[in-house]
Image (tube, rainbow, N blue to C red):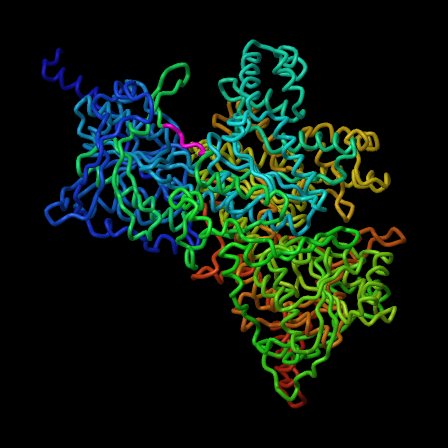
């Protein structure tokens, strides 16, 4: 049956209609406390915005193109040459009351503040008319082309205000370029009856917006298109658009990490840290971070290109700096570089281009084959490169077969070329220093951070402005917010034609109009300020630690230095304090055999936040309110015992003078009649363990509580090696004032966690005698506590007067037990790691294309990984203890991860986050056995460094075969130089890359068998050094200061062999229970640390392992069961020093923290009640019940002891 003409035409019209797919995107499944605060926090806005929707439009000059004026004009006949506009507060007649239908799309890479742009658009149109509608296109521009969208209502918008990420809608890098793509986009906009489309993106995305606006105008489509400038790279800006949103937050997030690394560098003085920063096409991030942190060297790609600096020249410049520093006794430093540096080195562009051509002609991707096929010039460059970089150039290809430049670890390449240059100079007698490197790559963790106050306000203002421009009928404009040097309330808003930023570039062989990238201007004020100061930074240690982004402290509204210089010119120098006068500062003094340089940091070198923290007054337990040892009285509790009765005999024989000493508790309230008489003592303090935030507050606590007694407090410079050399300085009011609540260990520095055998104990004894020390405070983790136990026994045996006490200080979480709930520094470090992990997880949910494998520092135990998992809700978390308990092989672990990847891919979730503890590699049975074998090879060789070949020839056949089955980089890392306790350096083994290597292989096998149809692209990162030396949290400030006070009181009362302890840490500090525990009460004979002269294992205080039956792990299992399939990522955000979250505790502490002192008191109270109630004359039934109950208790205790 034939249809009518009208029906047929209707069918044709229906066929032309776009297919709209309205979806309800996944909402965030979980929020941290700071995220909840941020959502409710009012965004500060300009008055021109808070005044409502009454705006008058002031049209300014018409603007041409940035370059190639006529060619750009020809491509935009309908939208070119429009005037820029400014919006001012208007009268009632200019008020907009219409209902609008507007779409928003997030395009390109993520940047903090994107959700606030959407909030600005939403609020404007709702203020105009509550019947307005806002539509969000999903997963970037393809959502516009395909009609995939959602409606954004009040509830949805409320869930994302002031939060980081693009996960509200998802983002994508698709471009609307072809005629059919533009046509389909127009039909989607028509079908939704959109009045406007706001494109939130970078230079390419906004160019796309201009092209789309031109197409819509040409085809008489009513939808107006306006853009908002977004990119963390900082390369989208001009005289009318001062900055792109996201740059401020990202640069501050990276600067926080760099500043922490710099303080870590000063604390140990043994590494050169090479830091690669995101920013491929421009070096704006690197420049801003350099201004913020003052590194020893920062390479700027634009300068490299301008000066035509080849790789040899760059290598020589870095080597010159290292040699100059070495001549001043400095074998450490910080070197920064942008990730795109390699593309600006002249010879590399030619080399990469020819390698792409060679490999496209089916040449074997081997070093020899490719080298032979290159022209002589490129062959010479290729031969100069380290082997690892050659492999990356040949093997890491994109889907088109080209080199993936962003994947090249430029920082490692430079370090290797510098190493070769230094070896050459060493051979010529021109360099006698030591060059040991650490590598960092900062990028993805900055893209989805909680936006700073500036970015919250700036991005909101951009969105509001874009909506207002559309409401006024403007198209092809980019929202502009200016007058940024003024308070936020005084900012001005307007719009700039996108075409005025365009010029013509050749893209894929064709001329294309694109927004010209704003590269670092070598004549601009920011670069000139950097160039003026970098020579000083290269030689002098002028590091600055900006600290975490704050939302409630003074200065929280301040913007970045680059913008301040661009707005204020040289006047900014005084405001940002870039060039402090160091002329009066003494030169560093080299002390002892470690050659540790001593020169305290003065306040004028510190950041504003560091100085702000100096005013914080730590809170202390009630019994320590007097802030003096004379106001503290100890209650001598019962004698202690060791944890396991089976060990008692051994421990009594090893510790005859200190075993079984009494537990000590500080009374909450002191009677003045019991106050202690002051004694003038000499007390030494030494950093033994690795860096942890709060160490300086321990020193402050010791000093403060001894103040007024006539005592002298000596700081041992250079850790345990400094103690042997008797290198010390006297702690005074000025030093303490300069280091209150500061991060790092740089006041005194640290070397190795020593004093572990009789030879070293004799050295320590001599030092204590020569320095006439009445007490020695050792700061560190479980290994330090073990060493302190042996040292105190040794001193007692030899009648040395020096009291030895220790303070728990370690980020790993291993320095905990039934007496110690947590060590100083763990709270801060875990919060920093959680922030970075949360940022990264949200980034994954925004881009929806990467699996992030994050390795977390923490040595053997997995406490950090456990806490970070509880804080952030990743998709997979591997705990070393669980792997060991289940005896999982490497293949088992790979299968576990691959299963998660496969399951998530089935719901199109080709992204996720995997947390990998540093100690995991040792817990894998076969790898652990191999590493033990390599440790033995090292011990038998007597050498500190062995080559891979030297190790292999000494291994068993099984060990050698297993080693060779691993990727080459893992083989090399497992065989690296051993650390001070003669075992592998876990921080140097990239377990996350090992797992990615084998997971990728496994997924390829599954894909070949048609079992897996997803995509797997992994990004690896190591969270380690960037958290150890950060500004301590309020908790760590309070805890460290209080423990220092306890240590001082112990020494003042003549106690030795004790660890300062506080329990009840879940409570406010006033209610903490303070006291001290004999070391011997925590020692076990576990046959692990083989270091006695007899070759037997030395009993030790072991690092606590994660309790697989504990409340924390049970809570994690419940959470992880959901997180495998549903995204419940949480972002704890940066550590806050004010506001509701400033006093937060770790979740593991909240779940598992036990007040041991209070429990003991409760037990005794209960036992006393039994004795009192069961005196002669009590009823027979009561006596029978009590007897049976106690018998059951005895049986349970017997079983516990046997266990």
- Residue 859 coordinates in the image, percent (x, y): 67, 48
- In-image side of 1189 versus 203 (left or right): right
Q: Is residue 719 magenta?
A: no
Residue sitting at the far bottom: 1177
- In-image side of 237 versus 441 (left or right): left
Q: Is residue 518 magenta?
A: yes
Q: Residue at x 61, y 16 (%)?
A: 378
* Residue 760 seen by the camera: yes
Name the residue nearer the viewer: 1195 or 1125.
1125
Write down the quadrant of residue 986 in the picture.
top right
Name the residue nearer the viewer: 753 or 143.
753
User: How many marks do you count on the picture?
Assistant: 0
Q: Residue at x 28, y 29 (%)?
A: 147
- Residue 1029, relative to residue 365: is it above or below? below
- Residue 384 coordinates in the image, percent (x, y): 67, 22
Residue sitting at the far front: 583
- Residue 489 coordinates in the image, percent (x, y): 29, 53
- What is the chief secondary structure element of the magenta stretch? loop
Magenta range is: 516-521
- Residue 1059 coordinates in the image, percent (x, y): 70, 66
Residue sitting at the far right: 1094
- Residue 383, relative to residue 106: is it above or below? above
Name the residue nearer the viewer: 388 or 709.
709
* Residue 187 seen by the camera: no
Quadrant, the C terminus? bottom right
């Amino acid at each position: 049956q034939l249809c009518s003409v009208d029906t047929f035409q209707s069918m044709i019209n229906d066929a032309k209609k776009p297919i709209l797919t309205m979806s309800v995107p996944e909402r965030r499944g979980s929020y941290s406390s700071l995220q909840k605060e941020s959502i409710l926090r009012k965004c500060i806005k300009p008055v021109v915005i808070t005044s409502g929707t009454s705006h008058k439009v002031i049209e300014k000059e018409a603007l041409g193109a940035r370059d190639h004026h006529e060619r750009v004009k020809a491509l935009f006949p309908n939208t070119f040459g429009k005037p820029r506009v400014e919006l001012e507060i208007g009268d009632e007649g200019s008020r907009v009351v219409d209902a609008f239908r507007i779409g928003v799309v997030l395009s390109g890479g993520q940047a903090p503040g994107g959700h606030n742009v959407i909030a600005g658009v939403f609020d404007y149109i709702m203020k105009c008319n509550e019947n307005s509608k806002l539509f969000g296109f999903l997963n970037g521009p393809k959502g516009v082309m395909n009609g995939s969208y959602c409606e954004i209502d009040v509830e949805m918008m409320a869930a994302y205000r002031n939060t980081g990420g693009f996960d509200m809608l998802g983002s994508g890098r698709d471009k609307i370029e072809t005629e059919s793509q533009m046509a389909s986009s127009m039909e989607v906009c028509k079908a939704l009856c959109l009045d406007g489309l706001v494109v939130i993106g970078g230079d390419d995305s906004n160019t796309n917006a201009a092209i789309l606006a031109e197409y819509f105008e040409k085809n008489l489509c009513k939808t107006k298109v306006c853009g908002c400038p977004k990119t963390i790279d900082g390369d989208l800006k001009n005289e009318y658009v001062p900055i792109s949103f996201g740059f401020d937050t990202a640069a501050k997030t990276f600067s926080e990490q760099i500043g922490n690394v710099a303080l870590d560098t000063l604390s140990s003085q043994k590494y050169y840290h090479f830091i690669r920063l995101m920013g491929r096409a421009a070096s704006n991030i690197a420049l801003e971070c350099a201004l913020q942190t003052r590194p020893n060297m920062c390479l700027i790609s634009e300068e490299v290109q301008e000066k035509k600096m080849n790789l040899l020249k760059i290598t020589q410049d870095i080597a010159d700096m290292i040699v100059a520093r070495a001549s001043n006794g400095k074998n450490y430093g910080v070197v920064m570089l942008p990730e795109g540096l390699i593309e600006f080195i002249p010879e590399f562009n030619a080399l990469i281009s020819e390698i792409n051509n060679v490999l496209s002609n089916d040449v074997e991707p081997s070093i020899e084959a490719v080298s032979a096929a290159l022209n002589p010039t490129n062959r010479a460059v290729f031969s100069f490169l380290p082997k690892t970089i050659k492999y990356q150039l040949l093997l890491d290809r994109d889907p088109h077969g080209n080199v993936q430049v962003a994947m090249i670890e430029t920082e490692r390449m430079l370090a290797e070329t510098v190493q070769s240059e230094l070896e050459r100079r060493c051979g010529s007698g021109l360099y006698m220093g030591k060059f040991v490197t650490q590598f960092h790559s900062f990028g993805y963790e900055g893209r989805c951070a909680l936006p700073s106050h500036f970015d919250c306000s700036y991005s909101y203002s951009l969105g509001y402005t874009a909506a207002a421009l559309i409401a006024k009928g403007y198209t092809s404009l980019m929202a502009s917010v200016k007058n940024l040097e003024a308070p936020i309330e005084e900012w001005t808003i307007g719009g700039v034609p996108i075409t005025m930023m365009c010029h013509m570039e050749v893209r894929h062989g064709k001329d294309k109009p694109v927004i010209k990238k704003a590269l670092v201007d070598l004549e601009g004020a920011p670069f000139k300020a950097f160039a003026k100061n970098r020579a000083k930074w290269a030689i002098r240690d002028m590091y600055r630690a900006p600290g975490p982004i704050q939302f409630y402290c003074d200065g929280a509204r301040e913007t970045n230095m680059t913008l301040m210089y661009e707005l204020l010119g040289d006047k900014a120098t005084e405001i940002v304090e870039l060039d402090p006068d160091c002329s009066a500062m003494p030169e560093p003094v080299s002390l002892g055999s470690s050659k540790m340089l001593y020169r305290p940091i003065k306040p004028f070198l510190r950041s504003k936040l560091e100085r702000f923290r100096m005013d914080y007054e730590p809170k202390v337990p009630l019994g320590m309110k007097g802030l003096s040892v004379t106001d503290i009285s100890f209650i001598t509790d019962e004698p202690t015992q060791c944890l396991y009765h089976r060990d008692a005999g051994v421990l009594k024989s090893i510790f005859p003078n200190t075993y079984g000493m009494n537990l000590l508790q500080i009374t909450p309230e002191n009677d003045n009649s019991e106050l202690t008489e002051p004694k003038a003592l000499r007390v030494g303090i030494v950093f033994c363990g690795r860096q942890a935030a709060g160490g300086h507050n321990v020193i402050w606590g010791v000093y403060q509580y001894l103040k007024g007694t006539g005592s002298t407090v000596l700081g041992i410079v250079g850790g345990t090696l400094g103690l042997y050399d008797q290198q010390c300085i006297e702690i005074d009011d000025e030093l303490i004032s300069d280091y209150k609540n500061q991060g790092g260990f740089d006041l005194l520095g640290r070397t190795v966690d020593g004093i572990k055998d009789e030879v070293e104990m004799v050295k320590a004894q001599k030092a204590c005698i020569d320095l006439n020390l009445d007490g020695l405070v050792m700061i560190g983790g479980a290994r330090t506590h073990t060493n302190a136990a042996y040292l105190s026994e040794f001193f007692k045996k030899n009648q040395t007067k020096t009291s030895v006490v220790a303070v728990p200080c370690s980020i790993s979480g291993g320095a905990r037990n039934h007496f110690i709930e947590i060590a100083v520094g763990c709270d801060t470090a875990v919060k920093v790691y959680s922030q970075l992990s949360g940022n990264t997880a949200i980034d994954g949910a925004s881009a929806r294309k990467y699996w992030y494998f994050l390795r977390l520092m923490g040595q053997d135990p997995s406490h950090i990984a456990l806490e970070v998992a509880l804080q952030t809700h990743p998709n997979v978390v591997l705990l070393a203890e669980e792997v060991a308990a289940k005896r999982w092989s490497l293949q088992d672990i790979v299968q576990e991860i691959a299963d998660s990847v496969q399951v998530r891919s089935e719901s199109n979730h080709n992204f996720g986050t995997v947390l990998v503890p540093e100690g995991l590699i040792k817990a894998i049975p076969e790898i652990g056995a191999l590493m033990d074998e390599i440790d033995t090879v090292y011990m038998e060789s007597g050498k500190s460094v062995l080559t891979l070949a030297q190790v292999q020839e000494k291994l068993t056949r099984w060990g050698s075969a297993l080693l060779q089955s691993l990727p080459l980089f893992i083989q090399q890392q497992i065989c690296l130089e051993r650390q001070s306790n003669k075992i592998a350096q876990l921080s140097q083994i990239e377990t996350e890359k090992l797992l990615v290597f084998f997971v990728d292989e496994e997924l390829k096998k599954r894909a070949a068998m048609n079992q897996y149809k997803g995509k797997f692209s992994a990004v690896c990162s190591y969270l380690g050094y960037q958290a150890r030396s950060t500004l301590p949290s309020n908790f760590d400030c309070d805890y460290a200061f209080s423990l220092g006070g306890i240590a001082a009181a112990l020494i003042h009362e003549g106690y030795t062999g004790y660890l300062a302890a506080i329990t009840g840490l879940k409570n406010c500090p006033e209610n903490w229970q303070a006291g001290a525990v004999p070391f011997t009460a925590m020692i076990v004979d576990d046959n692990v640390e083989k270091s006695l002269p007899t070759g037997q294992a030395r009993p030790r205080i072991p690092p606590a392992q994660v309790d697989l039956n504990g409340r924390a792990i049970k809570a994690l299992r419940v959470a992880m069961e959901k997180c495998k399939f549903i995204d419940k990522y949480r972002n704890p955000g940066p550590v806050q020093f004010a506001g509701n979250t400033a006093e937060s505790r770790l979740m593991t502490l909240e779940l598992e923290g036990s007040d041991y002192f209070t429990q003991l008191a409760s037990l005794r109270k209960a036992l006393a009640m039994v004795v009192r109630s069961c005196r002669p004359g009590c009823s027979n039934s009561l006596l029978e019940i009590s007897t049976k109950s106690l018998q059951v208790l005895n049986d349970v205790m017997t079983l516990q002891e046997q266990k």
